[in-house]
Image (cartoon, rainbow, N blue to C red):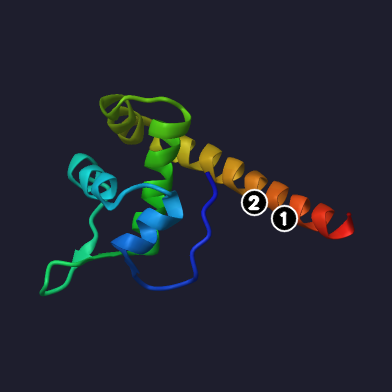
Amino acid sequence: MYIELPEKRYYKIGEVAKAFNVNTSLIRFWEKEFDVLKPKKNAKGDRKFTPEDVKNLQLIYYLVKDKGFTLEGAKTHLKEEKKKTLQNFEIISKLEHIKNELLKFKEQLD
């Protein structure tokens, strides 16, 4: 799943949830389940996700939602084969982005 967010230092949980088309509760749940997610919290306790957090969320989403991994399976896979999975995921994301751009271009030609 390729998501587009504006370039920022931090993203609010609502922005992240909207980009992934999921509830904020799922993002909070994944934060508890996956050690790689460590959003900063301000004095009020609001979560601020970095671009690195968003990248990790994309990887988790890919493993759990797209590939059908269980949470435990995704955790294990991230620990054991994160580099390889990340490379494959980045390639797939780039290809999806290119496909979307080509489809937009095609619509403009029609």
Q: Amino acid at mark 1?
A: Glu
x, y percentage for residue 78?
34, 35
Q: Which residue is mark 1?
A: 101
Using residue 94 as the reference point, say whether residue 55 is left or right of it: left
Which is nearer the eye, 103 or 37? 103
Q: Which mark is residue 97?
A: 2
Residue at disc 1, secondary structure: helix
* Residue 61: x %, y % from top left: 40, 40
Is 54 or 36 nearer to us in this picture?
Answer: 54
Q: Is residue 81 above or below residue 98?
A: above
What residue is rendered at 46% in x and 27% in y? 67
* Cβ atoms at labels 2 and 1 below 8 Å apart: yes
x%, y% of residue 57? 37, 48
Position of residue 39 relative to residue 6, above or below, is above
Task: Name the residue furthest right.
Answer: 109
Q: The C terminus lies in which quarter of the figure?
A: bottom right
**Alpha-carbon neighbours of circle 1 within 10 Å: few (<14), some, or many (≥20)?**
few
**Is 60 situated left or right of 75 in this image?**
right
Amino acid type at mark 2: His
Q: How many marks?
A: 2
Q: What residue sits 43% from the left and 47% below the top? A: 58
Dot label at residue 75 = none
Disc 2 and disc 1: Cα gap in Å? 6 Å
**Residue 62, picture quadrant:** top left
How far across and how far down the image is residue 24, in percent?
28, 52
Q: Residue at x 17, y 44 (%)?
A: 32
